[in-house]
Amino acid sequence: MNKAELIDAMASQAGLSKADAKRALDAFIDTTSGALKGGNRVALVGFGSFSVSKRSARKGRNPRTGKEINIAAKNVVKFKAGAELSGNVN
């Protein structure tokens, strides 16, 4: 499901116009991104939680040449599914 399909599904389930559903989805994405950027965790009970984890610098290999390269440290977003979401999927 892509973003446009998600907006259509949200609009039909919530009885919103597509424009309102798009604004709601964009607001959710912006708010969640801002919270994660600030180092906070976003938890949606029953659905799951988003958090930021630090990945340390490491050495890797260029698959084409086999030459060793340095991979910089960075922050990565993690998602852990909640019990209700996991139950619905299985």
Image: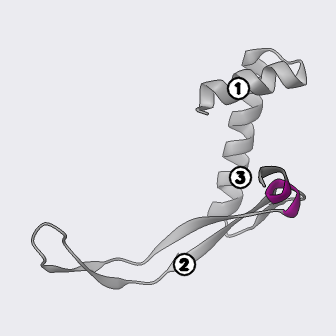
Q: Pointer 3 and pointer 2: residues touching (CB < 8 Å)?
A: no
Q: Which residues are magenta?
A: 83-87
Q: Pointer 1 and pointer 3: residues touching (CB < 8 Å)?
A: no
Give amino acid for label 3.
Answer: Thr
Seen at 41% across and 78% down, the residue is 73
In the picture of the structure, the residue carrying the numbered disc 2 is: 54
Asked if 59 appears above or below 27 in the picture, the reply is: below
Give amino acid for label 2.
Answer: Lys
Q: Earlier in the sequence, mark 1 or mark 2?
A: 1
Residue 29 position, x and y percent, is 68, 44
Q: Earlier in the sequence, mark 1 or mark 3?
A: 1
Residue 64 position, x and y percent, is 13, 66
Seen at 13% across and 77% down, the residue is 66
In the picture of the structure, the residue carrying the numbered disc 1 is: 7
Give the alpha-carbon distance from disc 3 to disc 2, as whole Å.
18 Å
Residue 82 versus residue 3: which sits nearer the camera? 82
Q: Which residue reaches farthest left?
A: 65
Give amino acid for label 1.
Answer: Ile
Under tag 2, what secondary structure?
strand
Left or right, 81 with reference to 70: right
Give the label on residue 66, or none.
Answer: none
Badge 3 crowding class, 10 Å Cα cut-off, few under 14, some 14 to 19, many 20 or more, is some
